[in-house]
Structures are given as structure tokens and as C-alpha cells.
């Protein structure tokens, strides 16, 4: 066969030009491979962004817990002072009761806030992990095409 000639294949009433079909298949393979390589880069960037997001979520939760500790300490000051004043003026039982109630309220408030922060963090991290799993699956599929 010389340059420019085509092989005409006839099968069951269908005619195809063999070299053209082969050339189209090669172009399609090249396009698929390029698309997969570009997709891999994008997915790897997304994966890095998720890791950055995960670190930021931990930082935010830590700052919120520290803030809750400070608020709890500030809230406790009036109750503790009232308890000490009552204790000092001879109202020992009432003063001690107010003091203990104030401390219990502050500890309970702090624990509640801390628990809510941890629950929200846990939900956000599950969401990030779910996205991460989906991206890793897409990376695996595209690596198969790109390689």
C-alpha cells in the first residue's frame, strides 16, 4: 500500500477506512491521556487544599476552646467574689454554697461549650475526610488513564 491509499473493509454492509479509524483512536487516546493528566494536577491541588482546611479547622477549634476557658474564668469572678464576701461577713454556709454553685456553673458551661466545639469539629472533619476519599478515588481512576 502506498501513501494516501486506504484499505476499505466491508463487513455485513458496513464499510470502514482502516487507517482513518486507527488514527482517530490514537488521537482519542492522546486526548484522554492529556485530560487525565490535567485532572490529576487539579485533584492533587484539591487534596492539598483539604489538608490545609483540616489544619485550619483544628486551629479554629483550639482557639474557640481557649476563648471558652477565658469566658468561664471571667464568669466565675462575680460568683466567687460574692461567695467570699458572704463567707467573710459570717454567712459561712451561704457563702460556701454560692461559691460552689458559681464554680459548678462555670465548669458546666465550659464543658458544654467545649463539647459543642468538639462535635462541630468532628462533623467538619468527617466532611473533609469524605471529600478526601472521593478525590483519592478520582486520582486512582485518572492515574490508570494517564499511565
Image (tube, grey):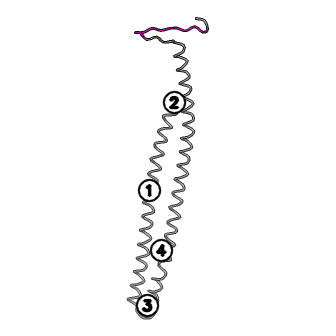
Q: Are marks 3 and 4 in contact (CB under 8 Å)?
A: no
Q: Residues within 10 Å of mark 3 (few under 14, many from 20)?
A: some
Q: Residues within 10 Å of mark 4 (few under 14, many from 20)?
A: many
Disc number at residue 98? none
Q: Secondary structure at mark 3?
A: helix
Check disc 3 and report the residue beneath it.
86
Residue 68 % position (x, y): 49, 69
Q: Secondary structure at mark 1?
A: helix
Q: In the rendered structure, which disc, 1 or 4, sits on the residue that comes first in sequence?
A: 4
Q: In the rendered structure, which disc, 2 or 4, sits on the residue that comes first in sequence?
A: 4
Q: Quadrant of the N terminus?
A: top right
Check disc 2 and report the residue beneath it.
145
C-alpha separation, residue under disc 3 versus residue under disc 4: 22 Å
- Of 11 and 59, which appears nearest the observer? 11
Per the rendered image, the range of residues in magenta is 3-13
Check disc 1 and report the residue beneath it.
122
> Does 115 sit above or below residue 106?
above
Q: Quarter of the image holding residue 56?
A: bottom right
Q: Secondary structure at mark 4?
A: helix
Instruction: Look at 51% across and 30% down and name the residue there.
Output: 145
Q: Are marks 1 and 3 in contact (CB under 8 Å)?
A: no
> Does 91 sit above or below residue 68?
below
Instruction: Look at 43% across and 55% down and name the residue there.
Output: 123
Reply yes or no: does residue 91 show up in magenta. no
Q: Quadrant of the C terminus?
A: top right
Check disc 4 and report the residue beneath it.
72
Amino acid at each position: 500500500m502506498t501513501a494516501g491509499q486506504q484499505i476499505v473493509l466491508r463487513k455485513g454492509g458496513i464499510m470502514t477506512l482502516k487507517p482513518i479509524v486507527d488514527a482517530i483512536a490514537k488521537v482519542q487516546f492522546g486526548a484522554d491521556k492529556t485530560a487525565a493528566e490535567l485532572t490529576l494536577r487539579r485533584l492533587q491541588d484539591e487534596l492539598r487544599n483539604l489538608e490545609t482546611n483540616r489544619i485550619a479547622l483544628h486551629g479554629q477549634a483550639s482557639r474557640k476552646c481557649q476563648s471558652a476557658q477565658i469566658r468561664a474564668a471571667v464568669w466565675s469572678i462575680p460568683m466567687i467574689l460574692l461567695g467570699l464576701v458572704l463567707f467573710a461577713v459570717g454567712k459561712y454556709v451561704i457563702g460556701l454554697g454560692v461559691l460552689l454553685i458559681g464554680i459548678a456553673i462555670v465548669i458546666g458551661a465550659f464543658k458544654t461549650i467545649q463539647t459543642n466545639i468538639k462535635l462541630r469539629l468532628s462533623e467538619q472533619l468527617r466532611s473533609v475526610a469524605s471529600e478526601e476519599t472521593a478525590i483519592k478515588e478520582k486520582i486512582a481512576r485518572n492515574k490508570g488513564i494517564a499511565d
